[in-house]
Amino acid sequence: MKEQRTAWLLVAPALGSILLIAMFPLGWTIWESLHQHDLRMPWLGRPFVGLSNYATVAGDARFWGAIGHTAFFAFASILLELALGLVLALAMNRTFRGRGVVRAAVLLPWAIPTVVAALLSRFMFESPWGVVDVLLTRAGLVDKPVVWLAGAQIAWVPLILADVWKTTPFVALLLLAGLQNIDRELYEAASIDGASAWWQLRRITLPLLKPAIVVALIFRTLDAFRVFDLVYVLTGGGPGTSTEPIALYTFNTLLQNLEFGYGAALSVVVFAATFGLAMVYIRWVGGVAPGEAAAR
Amino acid sequence: MSGRVWWRAVLTALVLFAAAPFAWAIIASLTPGAVLGGAPALWPRNPTLEHYRALFAVRSFWLPIRNSLVVAGTTTVLCVSAGALAAYALARLEMRGKRAILAVILAVTMFPQIAIVSPLYMLLRAMHLIDSYPGLILPYVTFAMPLAVWLLVGFFRQLPRDLEEQAMVDGASRWQVMRRVVLPLSAPGLATTAILTFIYCWNEFLFALSFTLGPERQTVPVAIALFRGQYQIPWGEILAAAILATAPVAIVVLAFQRRIVQGLTAGAVKG
Protein backbone atom coordinates (compact mmCIF):
# COMPACT_ATOMS: atom_id res chain seq x y z
CA MET A 1 0.00 0.00 0.00
CA LYS A 2 2.79 2.36 0.97
CA GLU A 3 4.62 1.51 -2.22
CA GLN A 4 1.52 2.34 -4.27
CA ARG A 5 1.45 5.78 -2.70
CA THR A 6 5.12 6.41 -3.30
CA ALA A 7 4.73 5.32 -6.89
CA TRP A 8 1.86 7.71 -7.54
CA LEU A 9 3.78 10.50 -5.84
CA LEU A 10 6.75 9.93 -8.11
CA VAL A 11 4.63 9.75 -11.25
CA ALA A 12 2.52 12.79 -10.34
CA PRO A 13 4.71 15.65 -11.64
CA ALA A 14 5.33 14.08 -15.04
CA LEU A 15 1.82 12.77 -15.52
CA GLY A 16 0.29 15.97 -14.16
CA SER A 17 2.11 18.18 -16.63
CA ILE A 18 1.13 15.90 -19.49
CA LEU A 19 -2.53 15.89 -18.52
CA LEU A 20 -2.61 19.63 -17.83
CA ILE A 21 -0.97 20.81 -21.03
CA ALA A 22 -1.97 18.08 -23.47
CA MET A 23 -5.27 16.57 -22.37
CA PHE A 24 -7.01 19.61 -20.94
CA PRO A 25 -6.36 21.79 -24.02
CA LEU A 26 -7.53 18.94 -26.22
CA GLY A 27 -10.87 18.97 -24.41
CA TRP A 28 -10.94 22.72 -24.89
CA THR A 29 -10.32 22.33 -28.62
CA ILE A 30 -13.22 19.90 -28.95
CA TRP A 31 -15.52 22.25 -27.02
CA GLU A 32 -14.38 25.24 -29.05
CA SER A 33 -15.02 23.37 -32.30
CA LEU A 34 -18.73 23.30 -31.44
CA HIS A 35 -18.86 27.09 -31.28
CA GLN A 36 -18.62 29.95 -33.68
CA HIS A 37 -15.66 31.96 -32.47
CA ASP A 38 -14.01 34.57 -34.63
CA LEU A 39 -11.50 36.81 -32.89
CA ARG A 40 -11.81 39.37 -35.69
CA MET A 41 -15.53 39.71 -34.96
CA PRO A 42 -15.73 39.77 -31.17
CA TRP A 43 -19.22 41.34 -31.27
CA LEU A 44 -20.57 38.00 -32.48
CA GLY A 45 -19.67 36.45 -29.15
CA ARG A 46 -19.21 32.72 -29.07
CA PRO A 47 -22.53 31.09 -29.92
CA PHE A 48 -22.96 27.32 -29.78
CA VAL A 49 -23.35 26.03 -33.32
CA GLY A 50 -23.31 22.26 -32.86
CA LEU A 51 -21.58 20.38 -35.64
CA SER A 52 -21.89 23.11 -38.23
CA ASN A 53 -18.14 23.78 -38.22
CA TYR A 54 -17.61 20.15 -39.17
CA ALA A 55 -20.19 20.43 -41.92
CA THR A 56 -18.19 23.38 -43.25
CA VAL A 57 -15.00 21.31 -43.09
CA ALA A 58 -16.61 18.55 -45.13
CA GLY A 59 -17.45 21.00 -47.92
CA ASP A 60 -14.23 23.03 -47.72
CA ALA A 61 -12.24 22.62 -50.94
CA ARG A 62 -9.10 24.10 -49.36
CA PHE A 63 -9.35 21.50 -46.58
CA TRP A 64 -9.57 18.59 -49.02
CA GLY A 65 -6.75 20.12 -51.01
CA ALA A 66 -4.63 20.27 -47.86
CA ILE A 67 -5.45 16.64 -47.05
CA GLY A 68 -4.45 15.66 -50.57
CA HIS A 69 -1.16 17.58 -50.30
CA THR A 70 -0.41 15.98 -46.96
CA ALA A 71 -1.10 12.49 -48.29
CA PHE A 72 0.97 13.10 -51.41
CA PHE A 73 3.85 14.52 -49.39
CA ALA A 74 3.72 11.60 -46.96
CA PHE A 75 3.57 9.00 -49.72
CA ALA A 76 6.35 10.41 -51.89
CA SER A 77 8.77 11.28 -49.10
CA ILE A 78 8.27 8.04 -47.17
CA LEU A 79 8.69 5.91 -50.28
CA LEU A 80 12.03 7.58 -51.05
CA GLU A 81 13.13 7.54 -47.42
CA LEU A 82 12.43 3.83 -47.00
CA ALA A 83 14.21 2.93 -50.23
CA LEU A 84 17.24 5.13 -49.56
CA GLY A 85 17.22 4.28 -45.86
CA LEU A 86 17.31 0.57 -46.65
CA VAL A 87 20.29 1.00 -48.98
CA LEU A 88 22.05 3.14 -46.39
CA ALA A 89 21.32 0.66 -43.60
CA LEU A 90 22.55 -2.29 -45.66
CA ALA A 91 25.71 -0.38 -46.51
CA MET A 92 26.32 0.64 -42.91
CA ASN A 93 25.73 -2.94 -41.80
CA ARG A 94 28.40 -4.18 -44.24
CA THR A 95 31.18 -1.75 -43.64
CA PHE A 96 33.20 -1.65 -40.50
CA ARG A 97 35.97 0.81 -41.16
CA GLY A 98 34.93 4.42 -40.82
CA ARG A 99 31.59 3.56 -39.31
CA GLY A 100 31.82 6.45 -36.83
CA VAL A 101 32.38 8.99 -39.60
CA VAL A 102 29.45 7.65 -41.57
CA ARG A 103 27.19 7.67 -38.55
CA ALA A 104 28.12 11.23 -37.66
CA ALA A 105 27.63 12.41 -41.24
CA VAL A 106 24.18 10.91 -41.54
CA LEU A 107 23.10 11.97 -38.05
CA LEU A 108 23.81 15.64 -38.72
CA PRO A 109 20.84 16.34 -41.01
CA TRP A 110 18.56 14.60 -38.54
CA ALA A 111 19.80 16.69 -35.61
CA ILE A 112 19.62 20.19 -37.07
CA PRO A 113 16.48 22.35 -36.83
CA THR A 114 13.98 21.64 -39.61
CA VAL A 115 13.88 25.38 -40.22
CA VAL A 116 17.57 25.30 -41.10
CA ALA A 117 17.09 22.33 -43.42
CA ALA A 118 14.28 24.20 -45.17
CA LEU A 119 16.38 27.33 -45.56
CA LEU A 120 19.38 25.42 -46.92
CA SER A 121 17.11 23.74 -49.42
CA ARG A 122 15.55 27.04 -50.42
CA PHE A 123 18.96 28.63 -50.87
CA MET A 124 20.09 25.82 -53.14
CA PHE A 125 16.88 25.84 -55.18
CA GLU A 126 16.68 29.61 -55.63
CA SER A 127 16.34 30.58 -59.25
CA PRO A 128 18.29 31.38 -61.32
CA TRP A 129 21.45 31.59 -59.24
CA GLY A 130 20.87 28.64 -56.84
CA VAL A 131 23.47 25.91 -56.98
CA VAL A 132 20.99 23.33 -58.33
CA ASP A 133 20.04 25.46 -61.31
CA VAL A 134 23.64 26.41 -61.97
CA LEU A 135 24.78 22.79 -61.97
CA LEU A 136 21.83 21.60 -64.07
CA THR A 137 22.35 24.34 -66.63
CA ARG A 138 26.07 23.79 -66.78
CA ALA A 139 25.62 20.04 -67.27
CA GLY A 140 23.26 20.83 -70.13
CA LEU A 141 20.32 19.01 -68.53
CA VAL A 142 18.05 22.05 -68.78
CA ASP A 143 18.03 24.84 -71.35
CA LYS A 144 17.12 27.61 -68.96
CA PRO A 145 17.05 27.74 -65.15
CA VAL A 146 14.06 25.98 -63.56
CA VAL A 147 11.93 28.23 -61.36
CA TRP A 148 11.47 25.68 -58.58
CA LEU A 149 9.34 27.56 -56.09
CA ALA A 150 6.90 29.17 -58.52
CA GLY A 151 5.27 26.12 -60.07
CA ALA A 152 2.43 24.25 -58.38
CA GLN A 153 3.95 20.87 -59.21
CA ILE A 154 7.66 21.61 -59.39
CA ALA A 155 7.63 23.20 -55.90
CA TRP A 156 7.20 19.70 -54.46
CA VAL A 157 10.70 18.76 -55.60
CA PRO A 158 12.64 20.94 -53.12
CA LEU A 159 10.09 20.13 -50.39
CA ILE A 160 10.34 16.37 -50.75
CA LEU A 161 14.09 16.40 -51.30
CA ALA A 162 14.61 18.46 -48.14
CA ASP A 163 12.51 16.02 -46.14
CA VAL A 164 14.32 13.02 -47.63
CA TRP A 165 17.66 14.65 -46.88
CA LYS A 166 16.71 15.34 -43.28
CA THR A 167 14.86 12.16 -42.35
CA THR A 168 16.50 9.31 -44.25
CA PRO A 169 19.17 8.98 -41.52
CA PHE A 170 16.50 8.31 -38.93
CA VAL A 171 14.87 5.65 -41.08
CA ALA A 172 18.27 4.13 -41.83
CA LEU A 173 19.15 3.92 -38.14
CA LEU A 174 15.86 2.19 -37.33
CA LEU A 175 16.42 -0.29 -40.13
CA LEU A 176 20.06 -0.78 -39.12
CA ALA A 177 18.93 -1.71 -35.60
CA GLY A 178 16.62 -4.27 -37.19
CA LEU A 179 19.38 -5.61 -39.45
CA GLN A 180 21.71 -6.13 -36.52
CA ASN A 181 19.14 -8.39 -34.91
CA ILE A 182 19.20 -10.81 -37.84
CA ASP A 183 21.20 -13.95 -37.20
CA ARG A 184 24.31 -13.96 -39.42
CA GLU A 185 24.26 -17.74 -39.66
CA LEU A 186 21.20 -17.51 -41.88
CA TYR A 187 23.28 -15.75 -44.52
CA GLU A 188 26.18 -18.15 -44.13
CA ALA A 189 23.90 -21.12 -44.60
CA ALA A 190 22.31 -19.51 -47.64
CA SER A 191 25.73 -18.74 -49.15
CA ILE A 192 26.83 -22.33 -48.71
CA ASP A 193 23.67 -23.42 -50.52
CA GLY A 194 24.74 -21.10 -53.34
CA ALA A 195 21.97 -18.52 -52.92
CA SER A 196 22.53 -15.22 -54.70
CA ALA A 197 22.77 -11.92 -52.86
CA TRP A 198 19.48 -10.87 -54.42
CA TRP A 199 17.78 -14.06 -53.17
CA GLN A 200 19.19 -13.47 -49.67
CA LEU A 201 17.87 -9.92 -49.65
CA ARG A 202 14.39 -11.00 -50.75
CA ARG A 203 14.04 -14.18 -48.74
CA ILE A 204 16.00 -13.44 -45.56
CA THR A 205 16.61 -9.74 -45.03
CA LEU A 206 13.29 -8.22 -46.06
CA PRO A 207 10.99 -10.70 -44.26
CA LEU A 208 12.99 -10.50 -41.04
CA LEU A 209 13.25 -6.73 -41.33
CA LYS A 210 9.52 -6.33 -41.66
CA PRO A 211 8.86 -5.26 -38.05
CA ALA A 212 11.51 -2.53 -38.26
CA ILE A 213 10.13 -1.40 -41.62
CA VAL A 214 6.61 -1.20 -40.23
CA VAL A 215 7.76 0.82 -37.22
CA ALA A 216 9.68 3.22 -39.46
CA LEU A 217 6.67 3.46 -41.75
CA ILE A 218 4.25 4.35 -38.97
CA PHE A 219 6.64 6.80 -37.35
CA ARG A 220 7.23 8.57 -40.62
CA THR A 221 3.55 8.60 -41.52
CA LEU A 222 2.73 10.30 -38.24
CA ASP A 223 5.52 12.82 -38.77
CA ALA A 224 4.62 13.51 -42.37
CA PHE A 225 1.02 14.04 -41.35
CA ARG A 226 2.13 16.78 -38.96
CA VAL A 227 4.53 18.45 -41.38
CA PHE A 228 4.64 22.18 -40.72
CA ASP A 229 8.07 23.82 -40.27
CA LEU A 230 9.45 22.63 -43.57
CA VAL A 231 6.58 23.94 -45.67
CA TYR A 232 6.15 27.14 -43.67
CA VAL A 233 9.73 28.14 -44.40
CA LEU A 234 10.33 26.63 -47.81
CA THR A 235 7.20 27.44 -49.83
CA GLY A 236 4.82 28.97 -47.30
CA GLY A 237 2.27 26.55 -48.77
CA GLY A 238 2.56 28.26 -52.13
CA PRO A 239 2.41 29.07 -54.89
CA GLY A 240 -1.15 29.94 -53.82
CA THR A 241 -2.13 27.03 -51.63
CA SER A 242 -0.77 24.33 -53.92
CA THR A 243 1.67 22.85 -51.38
CA GLU A 244 -0.28 23.69 -48.23
CA PRO A 245 -0.51 20.71 -45.86
CA ILE A 246 -3.24 20.29 -43.28
CA ALA A 247 -1.17 21.52 -40.31
CA LEU A 248 -0.33 24.75 -42.14
CA TYR A 249 -3.95 25.31 -43.18
CA THR A 250 -5.04 24.83 -39.58
CA PHE A 251 -2.32 27.21 -38.39
CA ASN A 252 -3.35 29.87 -40.90
CA THR A 253 -7.01 29.51 -39.97
CA LEU A 254 -6.17 29.90 -36.30
CA LEU A 255 -3.38 32.41 -36.06
CA GLN A 256 -3.65 34.34 -39.33
CA ASN A 257 -7.43 34.49 -39.80
CA LEU A 258 -8.18 34.13 -36.08
CA GLU A 259 -11.14 31.84 -36.81
CA PHE A 260 -10.79 29.90 -33.58
CA GLY A 261 -14.02 27.93 -33.83
CA TYR A 262 -13.43 26.68 -37.35
CA GLY A 263 -9.72 26.19 -36.71
CA ALA A 264 -10.59 24.05 -33.69
CA ALA A 265 -12.76 21.82 -35.89
CA LEU A 266 -9.80 21.41 -38.27
CA SER A 267 -7.57 20.63 -35.27
CA VAL A 268 -9.94 17.92 -34.10
CA VAL A 269 -9.94 16.33 -37.54
CA VAL A 270 -6.12 16.34 -37.58
CA PHE A 271 -6.08 14.90 -34.11
CA ALA A 272 -8.58 12.16 -34.97
CA ALA A 273 -6.59 11.11 -38.02
CA THR A 274 -3.31 11.04 -36.09
CA PHE A 275 -4.96 9.22 -33.23
CA GLY A 276 -6.24 6.53 -35.55
CA LEU A 277 -2.74 5.99 -36.92
CA ALA A 278 -1.27 6.05 -33.43
CA MET A 279 -3.69 3.36 -32.27
CA VAL A 280 -2.48 1.09 -35.04
CA TYR A 281 1.04 1.79 -33.90
CA ILE A 282 0.36 1.17 -30.21
CA ARG A 283 -1.31 -2.13 -31.07
CA TRP A 284 1.83 -3.05 -32.94
CA VAL A 285 4.51 -2.23 -30.34
CA GLY A 286 2.71 -0.86 -27.30
CA GLY A 287 1.61 -4.25 -26.02
CA VAL A 288 5.20 -4.86 -25.11
CA ALA A 289 6.75 -2.84 -22.32
CA PRO A 290 9.85 -0.79 -23.13
CA GLY A 291 13.09 -2.67 -22.75
CA GLU A 292 11.47 -5.96 -23.70
CA ALA A 293 10.66 -5.22 -27.29
CA ALA A 294 14.21 -5.15 -28.65
CA ALA A 295 14.03 -8.83 -29.50
CA ARG A 296 11.00 -8.43 -31.71
CA MET B 1 35.35 -8.39 -53.27
CA SER B 2 33.68 -6.27 -55.93
CA GLY B 3 30.61 -6.34 -53.70
CA ARG B 4 32.51 -4.55 -50.98
CA VAL B 5 33.76 -1.87 -53.36
CA TRP B 6 30.23 -1.35 -54.57
CA TRP B 7 28.91 -0.86 -51.01
CA ARG B 8 31.72 1.58 -50.28
CA ALA B 9 30.75 3.61 -53.33
CA VAL B 10 27.09 3.69 -52.27
CA LEU B 11 28.05 4.73 -48.77
CA THR B 12 30.37 7.46 -50.02
CA ALA B 13 27.65 8.82 -52.28
CA LEU B 14 25.14 8.92 -49.44
CA VAL B 15 27.59 10.58 -47.07
CA LEU B 16 28.32 13.21 -49.73
CA PHE B 17 24.58 13.72 -50.22
CA ALA B 18 24.24 14.29 -46.47
CA ALA B 19 27.27 16.54 -46.11
CA ALA B 20 27.21 18.61 -49.30
CA PRO B 21 24.52 21.12 -48.24
CA PHE B 22 26.44 21.89 -45.05
CA ALA B 23 29.68 22.41 -46.93
CA TRP B 24 27.93 24.62 -49.44
CA ALA B 25 26.24 26.65 -46.68
CA ILE B 26 29.52 27.19 -44.83
CA ILE B 27 31.28 28.30 -47.99
CA ALA B 28 28.42 30.61 -48.95
CA SER B 29 28.25 32.13 -45.48
CA LEU B 30 31.88 33.20 -45.89
CA THR B 31 31.35 34.61 -49.37
CA PRO B 32 30.99 38.37 -49.84
CA GLY B 33 27.36 39.38 -50.37
CA ALA B 34 27.78 40.63 -53.91
CA VAL B 35 28.94 37.30 -55.35
CA LEU B 36 26.74 35.01 -53.28
CA GLY B 37 25.14 32.22 -55.27
CA GLY B 38 26.26 30.81 -58.56
CA ALA B 39 28.55 27.88 -59.05
CA PRO B 40 29.89 26.11 -55.98
CA ALA B 41 33.50 26.98 -55.26
CA LEU B 42 35.58 24.72 -53.10
CA TRP B 43 36.76 27.77 -51.22
CA PRO B 44 35.23 31.27 -51.32
CA ARG B 45 37.18 33.92 -53.16
CA ASN B 46 37.93 36.76 -50.75
CA PRO B 47 36.42 34.96 -47.72
CA THR B 48 34.82 37.37 -45.28
CA LEU B 49 33.12 37.34 -41.91
CA GLU B 50 30.85 40.25 -42.83
CA HIS B 51 27.67 38.15 -42.54
CA TYR B 52 28.55 36.88 -39.10
CA ARG B 53 29.45 40.39 -37.99
CA ALA B 54 26.17 41.78 -39.30
CA LEU B 55 24.31 39.01 -37.54
CA PHE B 56 25.41 40.23 -34.15
CA ALA B 57 25.92 43.93 -34.83
CA VAL B 58 22.70 44.57 -36.76
CA ARG B 59 20.36 41.74 -35.83
CA SER B 60 21.36 41.12 -32.19
CA PHE B 61 21.50 37.41 -32.88
CA TRP B 62 22.75 36.76 -29.37
CA LEU B 63 19.17 37.39 -28.17
CA PRO B 64 17.60 34.33 -29.81
CA ILE B 65 20.64 32.27 -28.85
CA ARG B 66 20.18 33.30 -25.23
CA ASN B 67 16.45 32.56 -25.43
CA SER B 68 16.98 29.14 -26.95
CA LEU B 69 19.60 28.23 -24.36
CA VAL B 70 17.37 29.31 -21.47
CA VAL B 71 14.26 27.56 -22.77
CA ALA B 72 15.92 24.36 -23.96
CA GLY B 73 18.17 24.16 -20.89
CA THR B 74 15.39 24.64 -18.36
CA THR B 75 13.08 22.22 -20.16
CA THR B 76 15.80 19.58 -20.26
CA VAL B 77 16.49 19.87 -16.53
CA LEU B 78 12.78 19.70 -15.65
CA CYS B 79 12.05 16.84 -18.02
CA VAL B 80 14.94 14.68 -16.98
CA SER B 81 14.32 15.14 -13.25
CA ALA B 82 10.53 14.72 -13.26
CA GLY B 83 10.88 12.06 -15.95
CA ALA B 84 13.40 10.08 -13.90
CA LEU B 85 11.11 10.02 -10.84
CA ALA B 86 8.15 8.83 -12.88
CA ALA B 87 10.19 6.35 -14.87
CA TYR B 88 11.66 4.80 -11.74
CA ALA B 89 8.19 4.26 -10.30
CA LEU B 90 6.95 2.83 -13.59
CA ALA B 91 9.95 0.55 -13.97
CA ARG B 92 10.36 -0.69 -10.42
CA LEU B 93 7.48 -0.09 -8.03
CA GLU B 94 4.25 -2.00 -7.50
CA MET B 95 1.60 0.15 -9.01
CA ARG B 96 -1.88 -0.32 -10.34
CA GLY B 97 -2.71 1.37 -13.62
CA LYS B 98 0.89 1.21 -14.83
CA ARG B 99 -0.08 -0.04 -18.27
CA ALA B 100 -2.69 2.67 -18.67
CA ILE B 101 -0.17 5.37 -17.75
CA LEU B 102 2.38 4.00 -20.20
CA ALA B 103 -0.29 3.92 -22.90
CA VAL B 104 -1.23 7.56 -22.24
CA ILE B 105 2.42 8.58 -22.37
CA LEU B 106 2.96 6.72 -25.62
CA ALA B 107 -0.16 8.28 -27.10
CA VAL B 108 1.01 11.78 -26.22
CA THR B 109 4.33 11.27 -28.05
CA MET B 110 2.22 11.09 -31.20
CA PHE B 111 0.08 14.09 -30.40
CA PRO B 112 -0.13 16.62 -33.21
CA GLN B 113 1.02 19.93 -31.72
CA ILE B 114 -1.23 21.87 -34.05
CA ALA B 115 -4.30 20.32 -32.39
CA ILE B 116 -3.75 22.26 -29.18
CA VAL B 117 -2.08 25.45 -30.35
CA SER B 118 -5.21 27.57 -29.99
CA PRO B 119 -6.29 26.49 -26.48
CA LEU B 120 -2.69 26.73 -25.30
CA TYR B 121 -2.55 30.22 -26.76
CA MET B 122 -5.72 31.21 -24.88
CA LEU B 123 -4.48 29.53 -21.71
CA LEU B 124 -1.11 31.25 -21.83
CA ARG B 125 -2.75 34.56 -22.64
CA ALA B 126 -5.07 34.22 -19.65
CA MET B 127 -2.01 33.55 -17.48
CA HIS B 128 -0.13 36.49 -19.08
CA LEU B 129 2.57 34.10 -20.24
CA ILE B 130 2.55 34.90 -23.96
CA ASP B 131 6.02 36.07 -25.01
CA SER B 132 7.69 34.84 -21.84
CA TYR B 133 10.11 32.05 -20.93
CA PRO B 134 7.59 30.09 -18.82
CA GLY B 135 5.13 30.40 -21.69
CA LEU B 136 7.48 28.31 -23.83
CA ILE B 137 8.94 26.07 -21.15
CA LEU B 138 5.53 24.86 -19.98
CA PRO B 139 4.39 23.46 -23.33
CA TYR B 140 7.90 22.19 -24.12
CA VAL B 141 8.03 20.21 -20.88
CA THR B 142 4.75 18.56 -21.77
CA PHE B 143 5.80 17.64 -25.24
CA ALA B 144 9.27 16.43 -24.31
CA MET B 145 8.19 14.61 -21.15
CA PRO B 146 6.61 11.51 -22.73
CA LEU B 147 9.75 10.72 -24.72
CA ALA B 148 11.92 11.29 -21.64
CA VAL B 149 9.79 9.00 -19.47
CA TRP B 150 9.65 6.35 -22.17
CA LEU B 151 13.41 6.31 -22.69
CA LEU B 152 14.14 6.30 -18.97
CA VAL B 153 11.73 3.44 -18.21
CA GLY B 154 13.69 1.43 -20.74
CA PHE B 155 17.01 2.33 -19.12
CA PHE B 156 15.84 1.64 -15.56
CA ARG B 157 14.46 -1.76 -16.57
CA GLN B 158 17.89 -2.75 -17.83
CA LEU B 159 19.59 -2.02 -14.50
CA PRO B 160 20.30 -5.10 -12.42
CA ARG B 161 17.80 -5.43 -9.58
CA ASP B 162 20.24 -7.23 -7.26
CA LEU B 163 22.17 -4.12 -6.28
CA GLU B 164 19.02 -2.30 -5.23
CA GLU B 165 17.71 -5.27 -3.31
CA GLN B 166 21.07 -5.72 -1.59
CA ALA B 167 21.03 -2.08 -0.51
CA MET B 168 17.47 -2.46 0.79
CA VAL B 169 18.48 -5.53 2.77
CA ASP B 170 21.31 -3.46 4.23
CA GLY B 171 18.70 -1.09 5.54
CA ALA B 172 18.78 1.73 3.00
CA SER B 173 15.51 3.54 2.32
CA ARG B 174 13.95 3.75 -1.13
CA TRP B 175 15.11 7.32 -1.43
CA GLN B 176 18.68 6.39 -0.52
CA VAL B 177 18.60 3.52 -2.99
CA MET B 178 17.47 5.87 -5.70
CA ARG B 179 20.14 8.46 -4.93
CA ARG B 180 23.11 6.21 -4.15
CA VAL B 181 22.54 3.23 -6.41
CA VAL B 182 20.08 3.94 -9.21
CA LEU B 183 21.15 7.45 -10.21
CA PRO B 184 24.88 6.77 -10.61
CA LEU B 185 24.17 3.57 -12.55
CA SER B 186 21.71 5.24 -14.86
CA ALA B 187 23.91 8.26 -15.64
CA PRO B 188 24.37 7.18 -19.28
CA GLY B 189 20.62 6.82 -19.71
CA LEU B 190 20.01 10.21 -18.12
CA ALA B 191 22.63 11.78 -20.37
CA THR B 192 21.09 10.30 -23.51
CA THR B 193 17.65 11.49 -22.48
CA ALA B 194 18.99 14.96 -21.72
CA ILE B 195 20.70 15.18 -25.12
CA LEU B 196 17.60 14.13 -27.05
CA THR B 197 15.38 16.48 -25.04
CA PHE B 198 17.74 19.39 -25.59
CA ILE B 199 17.92 18.80 -29.34
CA TYR B 200 14.13 18.57 -29.50
CA CYS B 201 13.67 21.90 -27.70
CA TRP B 202 16.47 23.64 -29.59
CA ASN B 203 14.77 22.73 -32.88
CA GLU B 204 11.11 23.28 -31.98
CA PHE B 205 9.33 25.78 -34.21
CA LEU B 206 5.52 25.78 -34.08
CA PHE B 207 5.06 26.66 -30.41
CA ALA B 208 7.92 29.15 -30.45
CA LEU B 209 6.38 30.82 -33.48
CA SER B 210 2.88 30.91 -31.98
CA PHE B 211 3.66 31.95 -28.42
CA THR B 212 6.26 34.69 -28.93
CA LEU B 213 5.62 38.17 -30.26
CA GLY B 214 9.01 39.71 -30.92
CA PRO B 215 12.81 39.37 -30.91
CA GLU B 216 12.94 39.74 -27.13
CA ARG B 217 11.74 36.14 -26.63
CA GLN B 218 12.03 34.50 -30.05
CA THR B 219 14.11 31.34 -30.22
CA VAL B 220 16.76 30.66 -32.85
CA PRO B 221 14.58 28.80 -35.41
CA VAL B 222 11.88 31.46 -35.28
CA ALA B 223 14.38 34.30 -35.56
CA ILE B 224 16.03 32.75 -38.61
CA ALA B 225 12.75 31.90 -40.31
CA LEU B 226 11.56 35.48 -39.92
CA PHE B 227 14.74 37.22 -41.12
CA ARG B 228 13.76 39.86 -43.63
CA GLY B 229 15.82 42.26 -45.66
CA GLN B 230 14.72 45.62 -46.92
CA TYR B 231 14.73 44.70 -50.62
CA GLN B 232 15.75 41.07 -50.82
CA ILE B 233 16.29 37.98 -48.72
CA PRO B 234 19.49 38.49 -46.69
CA TRP B 235 20.94 35.10 -47.64
CA GLY B 236 24.41 35.74 -46.27
CA GLU B 237 23.11 36.44 -42.79
CA ILE B 238 20.53 33.65 -42.95
CA LEU B 239 23.24 31.12 -43.80
CA ALA B 240 25.57 32.45 -41.12
CA ALA B 241 22.72 32.12 -38.62
CA ALA B 242 21.93 28.62 -39.90
CA ILE B 243 25.52 27.58 -39.31
CA LEU B 244 25.45 29.02 -35.79
CA ALA B 245 22.11 27.32 -35.04
CA THR B 246 23.52 24.04 -36.24
CA ALA B 247 26.83 24.28 -34.42
CA PRO B 248 25.65 23.28 -30.92
CA VAL B 249 23.68 20.26 -32.09
CA ALA B 250 26.49 19.31 -34.44
CA ILE B 251 28.96 19.32 -31.56
CA VAL B 252 26.60 17.29 -29.38
CA VAL B 253 25.98 14.81 -32.19
CA LEU B 254 29.66 14.36 -32.92
CA ALA B 255 30.52 13.92 -29.27
CA PHE B 256 27.71 11.55 -28.34
CA GLN B 257 26.77 9.85 -31.62
CA ARG B 258 26.88 6.31 -30.27
CA ARG B 259 24.67 7.22 -27.36
CA ILE B 260 22.21 9.17 -29.50
CA VAL B 261 21.80 6.27 -31.90
CA GLN B 262 21.12 3.98 -28.95
CA GLY B 263 18.52 6.32 -27.52
CA LEU B 264 16.90 6.96 -30.88
CA THR B 265 16.48 3.35 -31.79
CA ALA B 266 15.43 2.47 -28.24
CA GLY B 267 12.83 5.23 -28.27
CA ALA B 268 11.51 4.12 -31.61
CA VAL B 269 11.91 0.39 -31.90
CA LYS B 270 10.73 -0.07 -28.37
CA GLY B 271 8.07 2.55 -28.72
Image: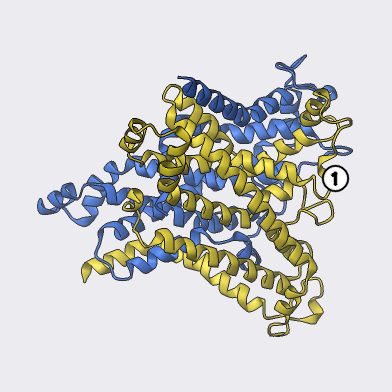
Chain colours: A yellow, B blue
Q: Secondary structure at mark 1?
A: helix
Say which residue appears at 77% left-offset and 14% top-offset: B45
Residue linked to disc 1: A150
Say which residue appears at 75% left-offset and 36% top-offset: B59
Residue B194 at least partly seen: no
**Spot occupied by residue B190 in the image (x, y as percentages of width and height):** 37, 44
For label 1, the crowd category at 10 Å Cα-Cα, with few meaning under 14, some 14 to 19 and many 20 or more, is some
Q: Quadrant of the C terminus of chain B?
A: bottom left
Residue A172 at least partly seen: yes
**Left or right: A59 as drawn, with respect to A180:** right
Q: Closest to the observer: A272 or A206?
A: A206
**Spot occupied by residue B34 in the image (x, y as percentages of width and height):** 85, 23
**Left or right: A24 as drawn, with respect to B27:** left
Q: Quadrant of the N terminus of chain B?
A: top left
The correct choice, above or below, for A141 with respect to A27 in the image is: above
Q: Closest to the observer: B59 or A221?
A: A221
The correct choice, above or below, for A8 with respect to A37 in the image is: above
Instruction: Inspect the image, locate mark 1, and give the three-letter code of the amino acid beneath it.
Output: Ala
* Residue at the extreme top: B46
**Spot occupied by residue A129 in the image (x, y as percentages of width and height):** 84, 29
Residue B89 falls in which quadrant of the image?
bottom left
Say which residue appears at 83% left-offset and 25% top-offset: A140
